[in-house]
Image (cartoon, helix red, strand yellow):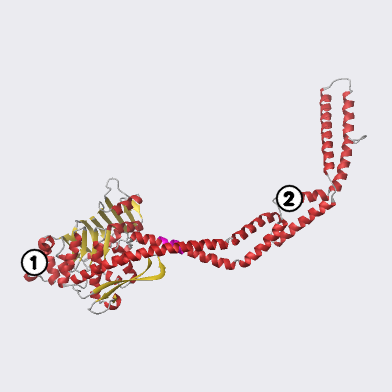
Amino acid sequence: MLTYLAINNLAIVEHLELDLPEGMTVITGETGAGKSILLDALGLALGDRADADSVRHTASKAEIHAHFDITALPQALSWLEDQELTDEEHACECVLRRVIHANGRSKAWINGQPCSAQLLKQLGGYLIDIHGQHEHQSLLRKETHLVLLDEFGHLSTDIKQQRQLFKSWQQVRKQLEKLKTEDSEQQARLELLRYQVEELEQLGLEEHELQQLEQEQQDLANAETLISEGQATLDLCDGDNDGARQTLNHACQRLSQIPYQDTQLTNIGQMLSDALIQVEEASRELSFFIDRCEIDPERLQFVEDRLSSIYQLARKHHITPEELYAHSLALREELDNIESGPQNIDQLAEKLQELTDQYRESAAVLNKKRHSFAQQLNQNVNEQLAQLGMSNARFEISIKSTDQFQPTGTDDIEFLISTNPGQPAKPMIKIASGGELSRISLAIQVITAQTSAIPTLVFDEVDVGISGGTAEIVGQLLHNLAKKGQILSVTHLPQVAAQGDQHLHISKHSTEDNTRSQMNWLADQERTTELARMLGGVDLTEQTLAHAAEMLSISRKKTKT
C-alpha cells in the first residue's frame, strides 16, 4: 500500500509530507482548497503527463516522492525483478520519484534508478487503482463495458491469448491477400519471364565461357599469321647456316680457342653460353607453339557465330555480354519464385484456416466465461443498486456473438438498465439520468474494487449526486472495502467522511503575494467541527456540531460491528 507521500512546489502546495496508514482515509476541504492536488501528485508519481503549469509559481521545479509497501503485491515484485529495478536492501519497498522542471521537462526514478514515465505508468497499474469523479461518463461508451466485465472476471490472461491469436490471424490474412493481388499482377510478368528464360537456356551459356570463346576466336583468326611469323622467327633462332643458335655456338668455340686465360674473357664466355641455352629453350617453345596452331575455318566460324549470339542476346536485355550469365541465373530464380506462388498461397490459406479455427475456439471459451461472470456481476450490481436507493432498477449485461474478429474476441458487450418496474432494459445512454448514472457507476466501481488484486484504491468524489441515507450507505461500502487494504476517498459528503478511519483536511491560505495549500490530520474534536462545516456551512451552530458529533459516534459504532 501507499505508506508515504511527499510533495514539494506542486501547484499551490509548497511542502507536504504524509505518512499514510491502512484503512479508510477521507479527504475533505472547501472548494478550491486543493483536494485534487493530492491525487494529481499521485498521478504524476505514477507516470501521468507533466507540464510546466504543475510547478508552483516562482519555483524552479516540483518534486514528488511516493513510497509503497509491496509485500502483498507479487505481481509488482515480479515486474520490478523483470525490469531489474528492485532495491536489494529493501526488497518489499518501492520508492517512486518524479521531478518536473519549470520548463516542462520531467525526470523519473524507480528505487533510485532513472526510468521513463511509461515505466512508471506500467508499475502504477500494480500499485493503485484510481476511480475518478467523472467515471460515470465512461459508462456511456460500450468499449468501457467490455473492459469492466473482463477486469471483474480477471480475464487478462485470456484476453492476452486472444489478442495474440488475432494478431497472428491478421498477419497471415494480410499476407494471403497480398499474394493473391500480386499473383494476378504477375501473370504478364510470368509470360515474359518464361520466354526470356527459355531463350537464355537454349543459348546454354556457361560460366567463363565468353572469355574462353573470345580467346579462341582470336587464336583461330590469327592462326595463319602466327604460324608463318612463328616459323620465320624459329628459322632466325635455329637456322642451319645463319641461325642465332649456330652463330652463338661458333662464338663460344672461337672464344674457347684463345691460348691464355683471362677473367674477363671467362665471364664473357659464360654469358655467351647462357645466351645459347636461352636461344635453344626459346626455339623449342616456339616449335611447340607452331605445332599447336591450327588453321580450322569451320571451328572459327562456329566460335564467331556463338559469340555473335551471345552479343546479340546481351544487347536485347540491355546488359553487357559479361553480365549475361548472372542475368540468366537471376531470371531463372525470379521465375521459380513466381511459379511457386500458388503453392505459397495454398500454404498460407491452410495456415489462415488453422488460425481461424484456433481464434474461434478461444473466443468461444472467452464467451462462456464472460456469460458466467456477467451473471455474477449483474447480481452484485443489482444488490448494490438496491442499497443505493435504486431498488426498482434492474442492471443487465448484454453479450452478443458476432462474426467480426476483434483483438478481444467476437463478443459485443453492452450494459443495459431499466430504472422502472415493467420497463425493458435499454442502453444507459437512453435511460439513466445524471444522478442515476453516478449511483450505477459507484455500484460497479465498488463491486469491481472488491475483486481487485490492488490493495490501494482511490475514490475521487465518486459520490457526486448522492445524498441522505444513500450517502451513508456509500460511506459504509467504502469502509468495508478498506478492511482488505487501503482506501483514499476525496468526498464532499459528511455521511461518507464520518465513516473514515482517519480524516485528512485540506485548507488554502492566501496573502497578498502568496497562496498555499495545507493538509492536516484531524483529531476527534477537529473532525466534529469539519463534519459540522460540511453539514451546515460556514456558520457553525450547536445544533450542527451536535449532529456532527452524533454522526461520527454512530459511524464508529457501525464500523466496529
Q: Three-letter amino acid code at disc 1?
A: Glu
Crowd rating for badge 1 (residues with CA inside 10 Å; few <14, some 14–19, many 20+):
some
Residue 298's place in the image compared with 131, above or below, is above
- Foreground residue, 348 or 246? 348
Q: CA distance from mark 2 to mark 1?
A: 111 Å
Q: Provide the residue span drawn in magenta.
A: 164-170
- The image quadrant of residue 33 is bottom left
Question: In the drawing, what numbered circle is on residue 550?
Answer: 1
Crowd rating for badge 2 (residues with CA inside 10 Å; few <14, some 14–19, many 20+):
few
> Residue 520 appears at what percent x and percent y?
17, 60
Tell me the residue that label 2 is attached to. Answer: 211
Residue 248 visible in rendering: yes
The residue drawn where x is 82% and y is 54% is 301
Of all residues, the one furthest to the right in this rendering is 241
> Residue 302 appears at what percent x and percent y?
80, 54
Q: Quadrant of the N terminus?
A: bottom left
- The image quadrant of residue 131 is bottom left
Q: Three-letter amino acid code at disc 2?
A: Gln
